[in-house]
Amino acid sequence: MNKWLVSALAACALTAGSLAHAQGVDEHMKAIAKSYRTVLNADSPEALKQGLTTMKQEAQLAQKGVPDKLEGKSPDSPEMKDFRHGLDELIGEIDAAQALADAGKLDQAKQAAEQFKATRDEYHKKYK
């Protein structure tokens, strides 16, 4: 009985870990989009900073995944490298907006965030 219980618990733990890791690039991108709306509509520095923080975290998680359009490509393929590069660009832009928000420059941080659209549009054309 104990061996059965240990086996069942181990299987549950492995399944739960797999499900948490299985969240796809699409889900991370949706979370980025939701946080982006929060950033653009923020009326307080705290809301803006939280939105930017969430965007960065989700972008970092998305980098570890593979978009549907690149399924089956090698992690070292030029397309995968470019996909990750696009997210690196976005993360850099988020960091710049975060620095402005940290300095209390809410309007300038929002203006910087407006530039995220160009990066999004460029890479969505390729990989969405």
Image (cartoon, rainbow, N blue to C red):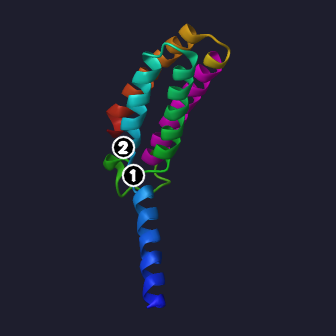
Q: Residue at x 54, y 8 (%)?
A: 107
Which of these two is toward me, 62 or 85?
Answer: 62
Counting from the top left corner in percent of width and height, residue 93 is at: 55, 25
Quadrant of the drawing holding the N terminus: bottom left
Classified by dominant secondary structure, the portion drawn in magenta counts as: helix
Three-letter amino acid code at disc 1? Gln
Image: 114 above or below 14:
above
- Secondary structure beneath label 2: helix
Q: Is residue 62 magenta?
A: no
From mark 1 to mark 2, how far is it between C-alphas?
A: 6 Å
Which of these two is toward me, 40 or 46?
Answer: 46
Would you say residue 89 is visible in this rendering? Answer: no
Q: Which residue has dot 1 on it?
A: 23
Is 51 on the left-hand or right-hand side of 103? left
The region drawn magenta spans 79-100
Would you say residue 103 is visible in this rendering? Answer: yes
Is 81 on the left-hand or right-hand side of 101? left
Q: Residue at x 48, y 55 (%)?
A: 75
The residue carrying pointer 2 sits among few (fewer than 14), some (14 to 19) or many (20 or more) residues within 10 Å by Cα, namely few
Quadrant of the drawing holding the C terminus: top left
Q: Residue at x 42, y 75 (%)?
A: 11
Q: Residue furthest top?
A: 107
Image: 38 above or below 18:
above
Q: Which residue has dot 2 on it?
A: 27
